[in-house]
Amino acid sequence: MALCDNPVLIDEGYTSFSLEKWSGKKCYMIAAKRLRIAWGDTPRYWTWKSVTESRFKEAAELSGQVFWLEIRGRIEKRMLSPSTTYKAYLVYKLTQHTYGLNWAAVVTVCARAYGFDYECPGLKEITAGIKSTAFLAPQREIDGQLARNKKIKKAKFPNEGRADGWLEMELGEFHYQGDEDGELEMICCEIRGSSKSGLLVQGIEVRPKRR
């Protein structure tokens, strides 16, 4: 099937759509331009650049320094295939000037009302009680830090095995029965560590969970 190997762009070029090869179920990637990225419109921190290997016209590069890393996306549940458990992934690369990404981030996927406001509740409220366990840097760069920090349990690291050469960090999962209204919110944030830079974001991918 052509849609299994060649995603098509929808939503004015800001979302890619494909079908999973094994099940024929719907898959999406939401471009960085459609995500809520804190200070994403401030060139001092984030710049938008054309990347040959991206599905989209532009990717977001954290070229400046931020302490507050906030990346949030949304998708309507009705766009998904029914009776399916989905996983969401942040799809990104690290640049040559990456630093500060060795702090554990919070990742989560949660059900929200249709048309929800990102500010109600705010980021701190919606992530309260969720432990910081996701490292955007590869495990080989973090092992020494984990050995010293006994508080971090069940650390998560990026998948480096994507066929397109990008990294992906699992944000969470959600089962869509088929009759629920509303949206899913997908979050990756790190707001308690040091300054961060050198992150290139293509988007957030939503695809069926492999059994």
Image (cartoon, helix red, strand yellow):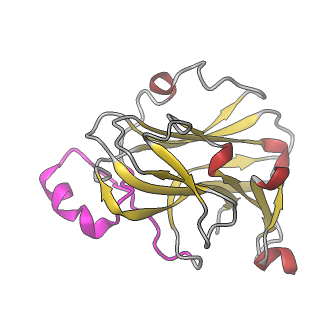
Q: Residue at x 57, y 19 (%)?
A: 121
Question: Which of 23 and 30 lies nearest the eye of the viewer?
Answer: 30
Q: Is residue 139 magenta?
A: yes
The magenta span reads 134-162
Q: Residue at x 69, y 66 (%)?
A: 55
Q: Residue furthest top?
A: 120
Q: Quick one: quadrant of the N terminus?
A: bottom right
Q: Residue furthest left?
A: 148
Give x and y (percent) for residue 96: 34, 66
Q: Is residue 26 left or right of residue 127?
A: right
Q: Residue furthest front?
A: 43
Kindly indicate the quadrant of the structure image that contains residue 26. bottom right
Give x and y (percent) for residue 199: 43, 55
Rendered position, 164 above or below 200: below
Predominant secondary structure in magenta? loop
Give x and y (percent) for residue 4: 79, 76
Q: Is residue 168 left or right of residue 15?
A: left
Q: Is residue 47 magenta?
A: no
Q: Is residue 136 left or right of residue 88?
A: left
Q: Residue at x 78, y 33 (%)?
A: 182
